[in-house]
Amino acid sequence: MKYYLAPMEGITGYIYRNTYEKFFHDIDKYFTPFIVPNKSKSFKTKELRDLLPENNEGINIVPQILTNDSEGFIYISKKLQQLGYNEINLNLGCPAGTVVSKNRGSGFLAKREELHKFLEEIFKLEDMKISIKTRIGKDSPEEFYELIKIYNEYPMEELIIHPRTQKDFYGNKPNLEVFKDALTLSTNKICYNGDIFTAKDHEEIIRTFPTVETVMLGRGTIANPGLMGEIKNNTIIDKKVFKAFHDEILNQYIEVFNEEKNALFRMKELWGYMIYMFSDNKKYAKKIKKAQNLSDYKGAVSSLFAEQKIVEGAGLFSDKE
Ligand SMILES: Cc1cc2nc3c(=O)[nH]c(=O)nc-3n(C[C@H](O)[C@H](O)[C@H](O)COP(=O)(O)O)c2cc1C
């Protein structure tokens, strides 16, 4: 089996990826959060920092592009080639309103004719492998049966499927019926993505789809950085390791963002996921959220690690009442 870390804007930037790799080194492929080609035809400072080879040493990383403009895709590809990349991922999954209203991400799925033309152009690129990360439709799962006909016309590196529609956002459950059909209909290799939050969830997916050889995990791994270890080696993350992992990310954010406030904002976002791994976590979650400075934040986190334990088998949302 191969395991990928899902791209997550605001979370899986190079600091998170490098720290994860240093502590756990059990991911076969990482993806950058999406990059949008712009009129100035140059990377934003933040994007470039995330892409620079010296910030991604020793890890297998694929840049992700979000656009419906083939020219933009092509010039960005050339720039990425110059940075040493030979694979790009196209985002056809983002469900955010601001993205969808511009017919990008999962919004592009409703414009099949345009999508077809766009793919026709970008697949002319030489020396660049292209993979696609897609939802199964914009409004209805039935759309997938038309989309797959289009995807099948192109020899892509892989087709990563998050079997929800844009309308689902993150609600409902992944549509495993459509995913099953995708496995028989697709002429490209398929990677499964969606709602693997525990080793048990992973087991169920593998049991249901024994031909799947690649899975991508996002929120489950952010909540429990030891999830891959549970899946691969049946080991539970040690609290000391979890704390050290946390501390390293925090210290790097402080260094890179200059301002404490920005580092805290990022850390709080991570805690929106990680908190579910801890017993009796409610009051600690509140304290972390309320912390206005580094010292309050560190105090809240230290008491959580000192006073609570990691719950075996827990995962994202597992303690929701
Ligand atoms: C906060 C957040 C940011 C995300 N950013 C991206 C992104 O930049 N590109 C992308 O393709 N998907 C993005 N996603 C979607 C994830 O990559 C993934 O497909 C989704 O979370 C489902 O997988 P999971 O259930 O394992 O988390 C994001 C999801 C979340 C929750």
Image: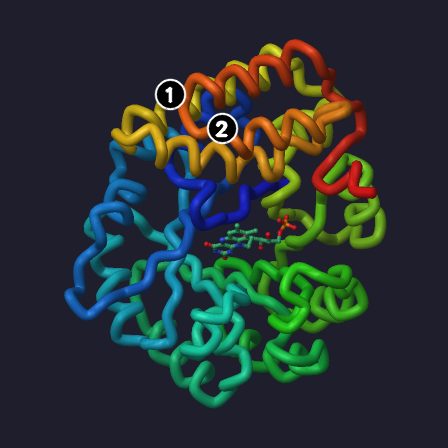
Q: Given the current orientation, which residue lies at the most extreme bottom position?
A: 113
Neighbours of disc 2 within 10 Å: few (<14), some (14-19), many (20+): some
Q: Give the residue at x 31% y 42%.
A: 50
Residue 166: give its label: none
Which of disc 2 and disc 1 is earlier in sequence?
1
Q: Position of residue 298 (x, y in %)?
A: 49, 17
| Closer-to-camera residue (238/31) | 238
Q: What secondary structure is marked by label 2?
A: loop
Q: Position of residue 62 (x, y in %)?
A: 40, 48
Residue matched to label 2: 291
| Closer-to-camera residue (289/191) | 289
Q: Residue 141: name its quadrant.
A: bottom right
With 267 as the anchor, is 305 left or right in this view?
Answer: right
Q: Give the residue at x 41% y 78%.
A: 102
> Eyeballing the image, is 223 above or below 138?
above
Residue 251: give its label: 1
